[in-house]
Image: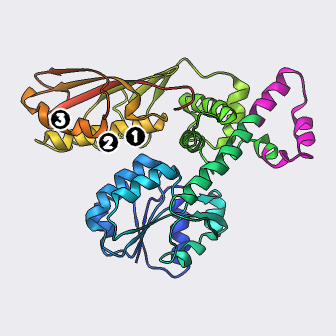
Amino acid sequence: MIVFLGQGRMGAPMARRLVEAGHKVTTWTRASGVPVAAAVDGAELVITMLSDPAAVREVLTAALPGLRAGTTVVEMSTIGPEAVRELRALLPQQVALVDAPVLGSVGPAADGTLTVLAGGDLSGCREVLAVFGSVRELGPLGAGAAMKIAVMSALVPAQVLLAETFAYGRAHGVDHGALIEVLSGTPLGVPAERLRVPSAETRYSLAHAAKDLELGAWEGATLATAARARLQEARAAGLGGRDLTAIAEHTLEGAAPRVVPLNPSAVPATNGMYSHAVRVGDMLYVSGQAAFDEEGNLVGEGSMTAQAEHVFQVVSRILADQGARFADVAFIRTYLTDMELRREYGAVRRKYITGTPPASTTVEVSKLFMPGLLLEVDLIVALSPAGR
């Protein structure tokens, strides 16, 4: 049995390909309400196609009780080689791990024409991976993840470069159509044509493009660093869910607003009276986060540990949406309804905030905005223009 974790733009058509090929497939999403450990129980093969390293780590951590000896986990998200190494340390040695991110978007996922970049021992999954398209066996574990980031470090900046080329052309009276026609005779012809009219369908989201460049950040990457900053600006302006080709419109329109409210789709919606976070330049101000779910129901009633875990998981998704980590937190403020529970809270906090702690304030309050809440946490985060 194959269990496919993640049914987003790429995951859904990929799971359908497996079913059409005759495999027995069970799919799982957060919205299903099924514990992920129960979903993977008895699976021979577990495939993950999720948004980012934090999501993969969270889901596979929750899956651990259900993973049996002999199961193979195939990680197909774009998370980078460092995250793959962390997963190998997380998973039991009796559970095999393969990294196999893909090149291609929604259309190739549906058609089975993706390029699978695989690292590790494929003996337990080679036939299954072939259902998705052509498989490149690249070497040891992590080789596929590294290859994917290397390729995107070229392809994504090229799109940003062309967007800036179009903006330069407009500023100097260059006819847009003529510019694309001239570019069509160069190696940049295909991506230039793709940017002619930004796609209404999100095939490869701008937010994922920014995330991919953030994963590939290194000191010598000057061109990728500039492209990453441009994408982060567009993401902060609310274009994260649009196709990457929207970067052309954004670049032509100019800089983003100074104050950008942010409400990532990966966290429970607000009541409309506040935003989860606001970005101002390279600073991120995160609203007070508390333990309630997508329906507004209390999570972890009576348990400081459960509520704190929920809060820090939500915060991690907000940070990931802006290419940040807990190491980027400059200030954290915590409101507790019972200071006697601070040790339980502190034990959870230390799992997420390691190393030298940020500036911090912890206060006791008589009550919070929802009955049963034991804590609320707000933060100030430093965001580097390079996403480092």
Let me know if residue 202 is in the magenta part.
Answer: no
| Disc number placed over residue 345 in the picture, else none | 3
Query: For the residues marked 3 and 1, what is the alpha-carbon distance in whole angstroms?
Result: 19 Å
Segment tinted magenta in the rendering? 162-191
Check whether the beta carbons of the residues at disc 2 and disc 1 lie within 8 A of each other.
yes
Q: Nearer the viewer, mark 2 or mark 3?
A: 3
Residue 34 visible from this viewpoint = no
**Label 3: element kind:** helix
Q: Residue at x 58, y 65 (%)?
A: 139
Say what amino acid the circle numbered 3 marks.
Tyr
Residue 259 visible from this viewpoint = yes
Vertical position of residue 201 compared to residue 333: above or below: below
Q: Position of residue 375 (x, y in %)?
A: 19, 31
Q: Quadrant of residue 20?
A: bottom right
- Mark closer to the chain start, 2 or 3: 2
Q: Residue at x 80, y 31 (%)?
A: 165
Q: Nearer the viewer, residue 44 or 138?
A: 138
**Label 2: element kind:** helix
Q: Is residue 349 left or right of residue 337?
A: right
Name the residue that disc number 1 marks: 317
Q: Position of residue 371 (x, y in %)?
A: 14, 33
Give the class, few, some or many, for how many residues have Cα within 10 Å of label 2's Cα (few <14, many ≥20).
Answer: some
Q: In the displayed orientation, state which residue is furthest to the top.
A: 258
